[in-house]
Image: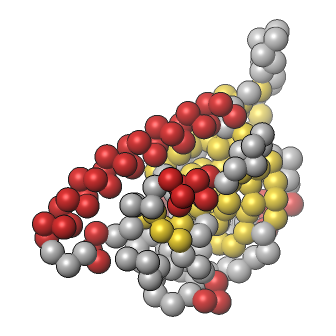
Amino acid sequence: MLVSQPIKKDFDNHQTHHHYVNLKPQRVLSHLVQLKDPVNYDIHFMAAPELDYRYRGAISNEYAYQTYDRKTLTESAVKVGTVYRSRLSGIVVRDERDLPSSIEREEFIAKKTKLIQEVLGQIIRWVNMTGGIFLCEASSIDIYDRVLVRLYDPVTGLSINDYLLINYPEIFVSYKCGAEQVRMLSGGACKSEAF
């Protein structure tokens, strides 16, 4: 189990490069350190120092953490790790601005707010069950310098990305990025044609 604490908070001072960096996906064991919202996370890639060089252009931060043995409750020495601002790839939150009337937009916003809270609770339960450990398929860097990821439950193999698309189609839709990039939404995702 990992116990983490940020060392410095320089995410807000990061200079965004505003270009998409297309990288081949690489699987690595990861620790989800902080949940920002249903699609944005701070992730530590465990035992993968080669990824520090690969993602040197992505938003990152250092944090201190300790591991402890659940049987003896002894703690390790404080270690320093790097977390990367990450975004679930292939998924975007539906945008109410695409709805034709203000009444529909207001109804959708109310429903979306309620479902986002439900999703956050579900993801927090998932993090608690896995101790924050997930199999991560890290790939490209989006125009906001976030690492695009697919997260998988290490026991069941279920993808968080697919789980959200299947179980919450009212608020999440699929998109494709990279060479097929057509239109941009706020948040760095390619616009889905599903609405």
Res. 15 visible in picture:
no
**Count of marks placed on residues:** 0
- Above or below: residue 3 compared with residue 163: above
Q: Which residue is rendered at x = 20% and y = 79% of the image?
A: 100
Q: Residue furthest top?
A: 72
Q: Nearer the viewer, residue 111 or 5?
A: 111
Quarter of the image with the N terminus is: top right
Q: Nearer the viewer, residue 186 or 16?
A: 186
Q: Which residue is rendered at x = 62% and y = 41% of the image?
A: 33
- Above or below: residue 153 compared with residue 48: above
Res. 24 visible in picture:
yes
Q: Which residue is rendered at x = 78% and y = 16% of the image?
A: 70
Q: Which residue is rendered at x = 46% and y = 51% of the image?
A: 37
Q: Is residue 108 left or right of residue 174?
A: left
- Above or below: residue 137 compared with residue 182: above
Q: Position of residue 104 (x, y in %)?
A: 19, 67
Q: Is residue 98 left or right of residue 16?
A: left
Query: Which quadrant holds residue 156?
Result: top right
Q: Position of residue 30 (x, y in %)?
A: 75, 47
Quarter of the image with the C terminus is: bottom left
- The coloring applied to the image is secondary structure
Q: Nearer the viewer, residue 34 or 101?
A: 101
